[in-house]
Image (cartoon, rainbow, N blue to C red):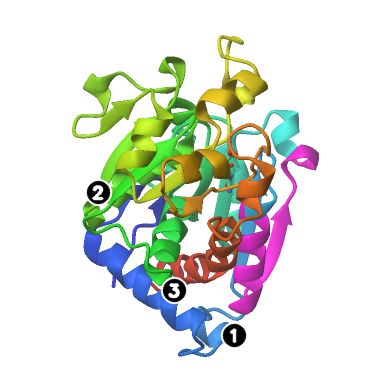
């Protein structure tokens, strides 16, 4: 199946391509296809780079592990010590990597939409590893894979995305992806964290966490993206936790034992309590485990195309 050379956002993929990725992730997870270079190796040594211009623990390492499980040569391109710091453009940097034989680069940038410019004439294949407040497509895809694997599949379900929805690239990708698989979405958070209703037609907006929990089958919690706030126009952590933090007492009071998802990093005591993150309702670690298989699938699909 053909895949785009640049995966910038969820809408770059058709539903048939997403289905293919879900199926391939499953095959990698259950060992139905062998690991190693035959999966991606049309060249002698497929070289795949990550270039993370913003901090990362999960995404970068999960790509690094996926690349190595596929038998790729992994290049950890360090932007801080590269010529990007000497004023070279991202395009020239990517061209240089491609002349050195790099076939695919996973890029994280703080500039929203920065990767769209490469779609017309890509210097090499590109996966968006998170761009500013815009999109983080591979996170949303691995979340969908995890939901389906664990029996939390979105068909006919109400999924609430709780927290800093306007500044979350993960949230933006999820709201494009989950409705395609039959989910109804509620965005829940304080007024300053929710988009205007006109921008998210078809999604429900709520400022009440209790009401949201009552209607929901799954809660997807988001961190407050303080680094992306131009002003400190939001409540302090304790105040936020009282109104929008998920804890076991709240869930018990509402009689709802529903799965809690989080892309990480979680701020314990803010959007989720210590007891909640340590409870059997929390599936963040399953998202991390499944991330490897979905990223292997995406790399294979893009390199084989
Ligand atoms: C997210 C990100 O970087 O967008 N983390 C991740 O990739 N797992 C979420 C966040 O930073 O809050």
Instruction: Tell me what residue is drawn at x 48 percent, y 67 percent.
Output: 294
Instruction: Tell me what residue is drawn at x 57 percent, y 25 percent.
Output: 242
Question: Label 2 to label 1, Cα distance in Å?
Answer: 34 Å
Residue 199 coordinates in the image, percent (x, y): 26, 24
Q: Secondary structure at mark 2?
A: helix
Residue position for label 1: 36
In which quadrant of the rendered image does the C terminus lie?
bottom left
In which quadrant of the rendered image does the N terminus lie?
bottom left
Residue 74 coordinates in the image, percent (x, y): 68, 66
Give the number of the disc on residue 288.
none
Is residue 276 highlighted in magenta? no
Question: Label 2 to label 3, Cα distance in Å?
Answer: 20 Å
Instruction: Tell me what residue is drawn at x 34 percent, y 40 percent.
Output: 214
Examine the image and state in which quarter residue 248 appears: top right
Nearer-N-terminus badge (1/3):
3
Asked if one can make out residue 101 in the rendered structure from this viewpoint, the answer is: no
Residue position for label 2: 179
Q: Are marks 2 and 1 in contact (CB under 8 Å)?
A: no
């Amino acid at each position: 199946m053909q895949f785009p050379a640049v995966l910038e956002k969820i809408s770059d993929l058709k539903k048939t391509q997403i289905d293919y990725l879900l199926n391939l992730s499953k095959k990698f997870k259950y060992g139905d296809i062998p690991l190693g270079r035959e999966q991606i190796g049309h060249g002698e040594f497929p070289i795949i780079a990550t270039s993370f211009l913003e901090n990362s623990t999960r995404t970068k390492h999960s790509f690094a592990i996926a690349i190595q499980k596929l038998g790729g040569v992994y290049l950890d391109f360090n932007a801080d010590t590269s010529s990007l710091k000497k004023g070279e453009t991202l395009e020239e940097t990517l061209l240089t990597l491609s002349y050195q034989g790099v076939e695919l680069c996973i890029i994280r940038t703080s500039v929203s939409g920065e990767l769209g410019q490469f779609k017309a004439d890509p210097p090499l294949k590109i996966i968006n590893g998170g761009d500013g407040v815009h999109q983080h497509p591979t996170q949303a895809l691995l979340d969908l894979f995890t939901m389906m694997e664990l029996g939390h599949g979105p068909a006919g379900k109400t999924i609430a995305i709780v927290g800093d929805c306007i500044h979350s690239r993960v949230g933006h990708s999820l709201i494009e992806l989950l409705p395609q698989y039959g989910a109804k979405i509620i965005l829940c958070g304080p007024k300053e964290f929710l988009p205007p209703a006109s921008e998210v037609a078809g999604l429900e907006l709520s400022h009440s966490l209790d009401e949201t929990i009552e209607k929901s089958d799954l809660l997807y919690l988001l961190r407050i993206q303080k680094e992306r706030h131009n002003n400190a126009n939001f409540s302090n952590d304790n105040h936020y936790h009282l109104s929008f933090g998920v804890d076991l007492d709240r869930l018990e009071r509402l009689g709802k034992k529903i799965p809690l998802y989080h892309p990480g990093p979680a701020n314990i005591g803010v959007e989720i309590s210590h007891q909640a993150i340590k409870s059997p309702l929390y599936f963040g670690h399953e998202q991390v485990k499944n991330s490897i298989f979905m990223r292997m699938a995406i790399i294979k699909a893009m390199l084989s195309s």
